[in-house]
Amino acid sequence: MLVYKFGGTSLGTADRMKSVADLILSDPRQKIVVLSAVSGTTDNLIKLSNSDIQNGDILLQEMVKQYKDYVAGLLSNEACITSAKEFLGETFHSLRTALHQQKPNDEKWFVAFGEFISTSLFSFLLIERGVNSAYLPALDFMRSVEGEPDLGQISILLKNVLEAFEPKDVYVTQGYICRNENNQTDNLRRGGSDYTATIIGAVLKAEEIQIWTDIDGVHNNDPRIVQGTRAIEKLSYAEAAELAYFGAKILHPLCVRPAREAGVPIRLLNTLNPTATGTLIDKENPMSQGGAKAVAAKDGITAINIRSSHMLMAHGFLRKIFEVFEIHKTSVDMITTSEVAVSLTIDDDRNLENIVNDLKDYGTISVEKDQTIICVVGSFGKDEMAAAVKVLLPLQNIPIRMISSGGSASNISILINAKYKKDALEALNKGLFAIG
Ligand code: ASP
Ligand code: MG
């Protein structure tokens, strides 16, 4: 079994969805296809769930028109067109009814329709093409508890769902959406379809998980900011997880974990350039060359500095500091310490005021917003000579606020003010990859 996942841009037009069908059908192996919503639809549904009736109705009309055209471009078999129109009629009727009832807090119920629509239309296309396929409703097996996927339950439920069918060549299911412990429609947060794909791949011990987007795999630097980046052929699970977490937008930050635990490789491929090699994420290759492989940047970081003479020779100080972050449910990304001060970073500053107030009990606090973490990923084992020097040397003209190295052998992170980000990424491109 293979798992294929396609993102919203790969489904952005009817022609693109048809190319997705061509692509999966060119591989004879049995597969589960996980789809996101057509690009723009999730945003529209979020808007819809928060709209008043008047604006909501206007938005619904636009969506009805968009999907009417989409179906016209997608299907040619009369029976399939009729079924697709009926399906869309019912879908938009449900959405309109919900909009007019104006129940609060049902955004998650609304957004799920993005994936219902894309997977249903894709299933009609497969039927039209005579493919031996089945539609698997993700809400029948994707479960979450306290906002996190419950792999134990998912494994049992998915296997039951699959056993209910005669074997099929292609199964189609929704990414992103799930049911929570209260049986409500929920989701795995924005970009969560990648996570669905790796969870399914992991619980079924798939041969491979293929994540198809609109770029040739993970690049060695941010292609939106620096010129001359290139796709990396191979990454270890650890390197890919660091890159996804620290800003490489191509992957959901948590999606590497299930694949890594199950030992299933992930391949990142490009629907717009299907013959490109892409990036293979797999077990660490002990023979692989050391040094830097890629750079990513994570914006919107806040640095907090706690300066305290109590810290001198004291034990238990860090525990008290971290407890404040725990109480305010905020995770810490980077940390550096000196004898009298600690600096750390957070990316979620919703509880910043409360955090700062509580930290004042332990010292003098200063806060700097608009910081960027530059994360350099590669093999920086302790035998790797002067890894940090190689990373820092190109940055000699950039003021560095924090450096974190040695936490893991696959990452060196540097905190800078966001205004130096472009210069830093370009300097690293030149210094580490001899580009530019
Ligand atoms: N449709 C969802 C989103 O836009 C999930 C995904 O695309 O992975 O975030
Ligand atoms: Mg995505």
Image: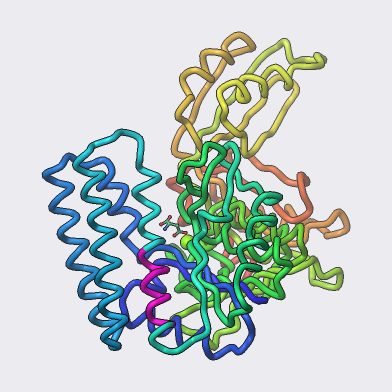
Residue 434 at x, y = what percent?
Answer: 61, 72
**Left or right, residue 119 beside residue 404:** left
Direction from residue 47 to residue 196 in the image, left or right? right
Q: Nearer the viewer, residue 125 or 222?
A: 125
Residue shown at 23% from the left, 37% from the top: 102
Q: Quadrant of residue 214?
A: bottom left
Question: Position of 426 compared to 160: left or right?
Answer: left
Q: Main secondary structure of the magenta part?
A: helix
Residue name at image x 45 percent, y 29 percent: 350
Give coordinates of residue 78: x percent, y percent: 26, 86
Q: Is residue 232 visible?
A: no
Residue 408 lies in the magenta stretch = no
Q: Quadrant of the N terminus?
A: bottom right
Q: Which residues are magenta?
A: 117-126
**Which color scheme did the rendering employ for the protein?**
rainbow
Measuring from the top left, give residue 416's x and y in whole percent. 53, 43
